[in-house]
Amino acid sequence: MRARDVMTCPVATVAASAPVSEIADLLIEHRITAVPVVDGGGRLIGIVSTGDLLHRATDEHFTPPTSLWKESFWRRSTGRYSSEPDRADGRTAEEVMTAQVMTVSPDADLVTVARELLEHRINALPVMTGDTMVGIISRSDVLSHLASHGDTINPLER
């Protein structure tokens, strides 16, 4: 099996200027866990996942630090100390998206796709032919294939 056999297309996308509330509504309405962010020419520039949006709901963002020392220690130990703005403060897709997007080709086998999703702890991979997004494959797509072919030894290799 290949990515092209189970990918979802057409792909729901958002513009870089899309407000976070619109992105959340889209994810809920379409029952998806990630949405690609595209520029004016339709080229992939990032992806927003439910995890990216959940940064906005973390307790440490909304509660003031109890001490500057604790805040500094927390930021250093979790890697959240940088000169970049906190994604939890983002208001648009561009401000909350993950810019380094992993992708796969339509010819990628499902074993490779499943490994990428698990090893990198991501929810979805845009499927690309050159610079053109032709689909998206999510954990749910792979799981649906497994459910419908669960009687084989390794249904991902069919």
Image (tube, grey):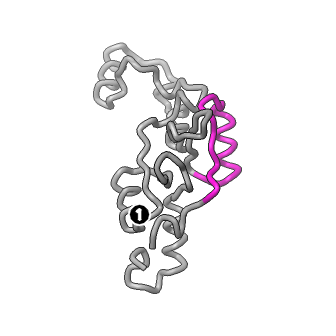
Q: Is residue 11 left or right of residue 119?
A: right
Which type of secondary structure does the marked residue at label 1 adopt? loop
**Side (left or right) of 49 relative to 73:** right
Disc 1 marks a residue whose amino acid type is Ala
Is residue 92 positioned above or below 51 on the image? above
Mark 1, residues whose alpha carbon is within 10 Å: few (<14), some, or many (≥20)? some
Q: Does the magenta segment cover residue 82? A: no
Q: Is 114 placed above or below 153 here?
A: above
* Total number of numbered discs in the rendering: 1
User: What residue appears at the point 37 percent right and 15 percent down from the top-left corner?
Assistant: 67
Q: Residue at x 50, y 68 (%)?
A: 143
- Report whether 39 appears left or right of 139: right
Of 76 and 122, nearer the camera is 122
Percent x, y of residue 6: 54, 67
Q: Looking at the image, can residue 124 be seen?
A: no
On screen, 149 above or below 95? below
Which residue is drawn at the image coordinates 50% and 23% (left, top)? 63
Name the residue at the top extreme.
68
Q: Is residue 155 above or below residue 74?
A: below
- Rendering coords of residue 137 (x, y %): 51, 58
Left or right? Give the position of 76 relative to 40. left
Q: Which residue is mark 1?
A: 108
Report the quarter where the C terminus lies: bottom left
Q: Which residues are magenta?
A: 9-32
Which quarter of the picture shows residue 39? top right
Give the residue at x 46% y 49%: 130
